[in-house]
Image (cartoon, helix red, strand yellow):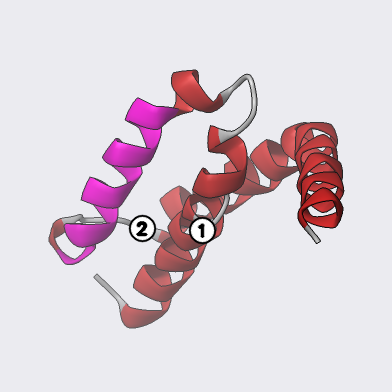
Amino acid sequence: MEQSLSSRLRNCLLTILELETVLASTELGPYLQKEFVVLKDVLQRLEEVAINEGDVCRIENATSRFLEELKETLEGAEATTVQTSRLLQ
């Protein structure tokens, strides 16, 4: 796989995986757990995957849509984390 395409795809996967901890504490957490396992597996096997520019563009667009759809959920999770952190201090 071309290095640039691989880097772009890896970036999308890592962006989503960075949300695992935050999303685990939301109502979506149980539903997304299996998906995070799959994404981690894909990330480890990335060099074995044949991919083209069109595939990467679709994945980048899907990642953007996913993040946009989660915006409200993530903001709510952040607010809860901040409130909990203040209580613990």
Q: Position of residue 3 (x, y in %)?
A: 33, 81
Q: Can you identify the residue that label 2 sits on?
A: 52
User: At label 1, which amino acid type do we have?
Assistant: Cys
Q: In percent of the image, x 70 and y 39: which residue is there?
A: 65
Magenta span includes 89: no
Say few, some or many: other residues with alpha carbon within 10 Å of mark 1 (under 14 / 14 to 19 / 20 or more).
Answer: some
Q: Is residue 25 left or right of residue 44?
A: right
Q: In percent of the image, x 76 and y 54: which residue is there?
A: 88
Q: Can you identify the residue that label 1 sits on?
A: 12
Closer to us: 10 or 54: 10
Closer to us: 55 or 26: 26
Q: In percent of the image, x 43 and y 49: which residue is there?
A: 55
Q: What range is drawn magenta here? A: 33-47
Closer to us: 5 or 26: 26
Prevailing secondary structure class for the magenta stretch in the rendered image? helix
Q: Position of residue 66 (x, y in %)?
A: 65, 37
Distance Cα–Cα, label 2 vs label 1? 15 Å
Quadrant of the frame with the C terminus: bottom right
Q: Determine the secondary structure under disc 1.
A: helix
User: At label 2, which amino acid type do we have?
Assistant: Asn
Q: Determine the secondary structure under disc 2.
A: loop
